[in-house]
Amino acid sequence: MSAKTIDLTLKVWRQKGQNSEGSFKEYPAKGVSVHASFLEMLDQVNEALISQGQDPIAFDHDCREGICGSCGFMISGNAHGPIKSTTVCQLHMRNFENGEVLTLEPWRATAFPVIKDLMVDRSAFDRIITAGGYISVNTGNAPDGNCLPIPKPDADEAFASAACIGCGACVASCKNASAALFTSAKISHLALLPQGQIEKEKRTIKMVEKMDSEGFGACTSTGACEASCPKDISLTNIARMNREFLKAALCEKPEHHHGEG
Amino acid sequence: MMRQVALGTVELQTRREMLDLVVVDGKARGIITRNLLTGEIEAHEADAVVVCTGGYSNVFYLSTNAMACAVTAAWKAHKKGAFFANPCFTQIHPTCIPVHGENQSKLTLMSESLRNDGRVWVPKEKGDKRPPQDIPENERDYYLERVYPSFGNLAPRDVASRQAKYRVDEGRGVGETGMAVYLDFRDSIKRLGADKIEERYGNLFEMYAKIAGEDPYKTPMRMYPAPHYTMGGLWVDYNLMSTIPGLFVAGEANFSDHGANRLGASALMQGLADGYFVLPYTLGDYLAKTKLDKVSIEADPFKAAINQVNGDITKLMSIKGTRTVESFHKELGRIMWEYCGMARNEKGLLKALELIPKLREEFWTNVRVPGEANYLNPELEKAGRVADFLELGELMCRDALERKESCGGHFRTSTKLQTMKLKGTMKNSAILPLGSGMDQVKLKLGTKKNSNLKTLNSQLAVINRGLYVS
Ligand SMILES: Cc1cc2nc3c(=O)[nH]c(=O)nc-3n(C[C@H](O)[C@H](O)[C@H](O)COP(=O)(O)OP(=O)(O)OC[C@H]3O[C@@H](n4cnc5c(N)ncnc54)[C@H](O)[C@@H]3O)c2cc1C
Ligand code: SF4
Ligand code: FES
């Protein structure tokens, strides 16, 4: 295959475990096809490391098509790299110049402890969802498709919020390590649909409280999250979350426990 | 599910991999997992086990599946006695972004809906390297429209995939590698306007532009088939229970719903049906009707399973050979793609059955797994999965060899026409039993009338018309 290739130098954060010291190490990435993805470039570097008896660089990944949210790290200060609306698994090497030096670092946030090298623990996001990111109905017979008409613009807006893949780039790009963009996307997605109305107040309060207690910082509306989000989640979600939270806090009723099922 | 997690009825065990099934007194009573962060081997006892671990397209190395998709859970259950049905029924999807080179790690699917408005073509001349826009209309071969006038670009998946392969094999493939065909939107854009096309396929066009580095509004997409779905899997009865009582299998991991060739959009439907409408009833029924003694993870079958898992891991770590796990996986993938892919024949399958055991032997004597077993170790995870693919691959080839007839995704090129009892009227190619492997003989049959040919399975062709969802 006669594909064009480039040579790069990588400065990669190596850290054995959560409680170990980390440091940058330099690796050459030579003869990288410009058609390869960034993760394929790392595969190539890892194959060479393994052959030389060295420890390969650990990074999270699964779908490699921008839909699962597993991948993500900083490339020279940019979450998921320099190209807008793109996860690192969908970032292609044609976007880099021959001879470039790239610095690879894991997401940095108290709520995302490093597991190894470029891998972090994002289970704090799972716990925010567990706090209320769902609709409490048990599955029974499928309802008729047209029994709950939803205007197209509402459906589109809910869909745009639902596009969040939970990658954590928003947290990593925020100087306060705030999870406001993620949490607001999840709250908005349900708040925009009729099915989400019933538990709206309770859900908003619980998810926001969980977000705060997981150690994410406060949102100061600098917008770095929106700029780095691979799924173009909009800041208007945060405004909606704040509005919903205020409304919910004002009319919060004491909770009744009927035992949920 | 997260609501149930909050309610305490479901406990998530994330970053764990099932490495064995535990059978006690003939019933599935637990599993063994490896904690992927700490390497700890953990035993879990249960009243019943439900395996929903997806398909095994990654046996081909390159597929549209996610990287962690593996046959391991299903394979371990098979080794514990669960029957494996139709392993060779695999689906090769026609519209994927083609391979760019040796370092390619996975293939990206472009939704099949693109074929609603895109026209598939290759140059008429072999080795025509002109850019597509410089190739005049009369020098293009819109081969699906030519070969299947009434299906046109909407021919069923397996048919469209094989046709693409024939064109590439004829030396008429396009792009840098010659391993692709064009999917061209020029005419639809002319007819409907770029806006309409953007409304329909905007996100797909964007994705393609990102990966391929070309603008599909201006130049045709390049496409090539890729392994995408596996119809085969663990055998289950109507209650989704395998041949091991208490072991249930749902989703792509079972063999149940799709016969020899899955139709578009039906995999997610199956997942919903299995999970929402079948298992909640059949699992409860099993538990209600079955007397289950108490089991403990201290019992012998658990200890034996743990020993087996630990033994395999120690073995993999101690080989310290010279070849990476990835290189074995790639080689297996090439064998499977070449001899057990879109078209299969006896000679090729016999060859694969020679190559795979040799490769497996080399794997177990020369693989290099770096790092430590009791720590996060993605290479060790991969090694275990590839070891199982090396066994599954052989089973797939044996199954494919055994099935002398063509059937859905399983296409035997050596199948003789006379063995298929065909009769009736063949007015044109479009009434051929697409999906039953007859597309290759189409040109010979062409316009024969009242011959002794009959559609082998005309329903299949009709069903196949309804597949253009994804
Ligand atoms: C790119 C792509 C697009 C598709 N588009 C469509 C579509 O539009 N419509 C449609 O109907 N179908 C589509 N399909 C098919 C469909 O998505 C799959 O068949 C379906 O998701 C399978 O669901 P599942 O739950 O059975 O398995 P999966 O979704 O594959 O889930 C299996 C899970 O088990 C995990 N796992 C595997 N082994 C182990 C183990 N040993 N221990 C622990 N965990 C394990 C895997 O990591 C995975 O998370 C598509 C498939 C792909 C790849
Ligand atoms: S909001 Fe965007 S950046 Fe944040 S988790 Fe979701 S997809 Fe990732
Ligand atoms: S690997 Fe799934 S989004 Fe990147």
Image (spheres, coloured by chain):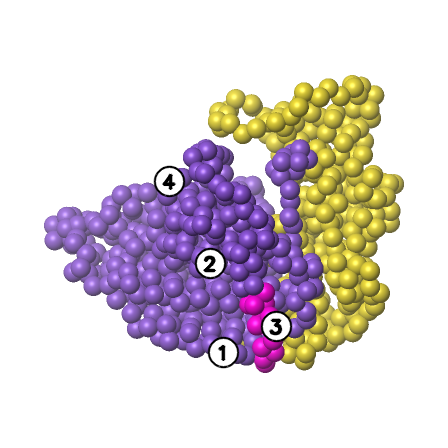
Chain colours: A yellow, B purple
The alpha-carbon separation of the residues under discs 1 and 4 comes to 41 Å
User: Residue B76: x percent and y percent?
Assistant: 48, 58
From the viewer's perspective, tell me whether residue B153 is left or right of residue A83: left
Q: Are marks 1 and 3 in contact (CB under 8 Å)?
A: no
Ligand 1 has an atom within 8 Å of the beta carbon of the residue at disc 4: no
From the viewer's perspective, tell me whether residue B257 is left or right of residue A1: left
Q: Are marks 1 and 4 in contact (CB under 8 Å)?
A: no
Residue B352 vs B180, above or below: the answer is below
Q: Which residue is mark 2?
A: B75
| Comes first in the chain, label 1 or label 4 | 4
Q: Amino acid at mark 1?
A: Glu
Q: Which mark is residue B362?
A: 1
The residue located at (46%, 58%) in the rendering is B75
Q: Crowding near pointer 1: few (<14 within 10 Å), some, many (20+)?
A: some
| Comes first in the chain, label 2 or label 3 | 2
Residue B204 vs A187, above or below: the answer is below
Q: Are marks 2 and 4 in contact (CB under 8 Å)?
A: no
**Boundaries of the magenta span:** B309-324
The residue located at (68%, 56%) in the rendering is A71
The alpha-carbon separation of the residues under discs 1 and 2 comes to 21 Å
Q: Is residue B92 among the parts visible in the rendering? A: yes
Indicate whether residue A66 is drawn in magenta.
Answer: no
User: Residue B300: x percent and y percent?
Assistant: 53, 56
Q: Both on one chain, marks 1 and 4?
A: yes
Q: Crowding near pointer 3: few (<14 within 10 Å), some, many (20+)?
A: some
The residue located at (67%, 20%) in the rendering is A258
| Comes first in the chain, label 4 or label 3 | 4
User: Residue B101: x percent and y percent?
Assistant: 55, 70
Which subunit holds the residue at mark 3?
B
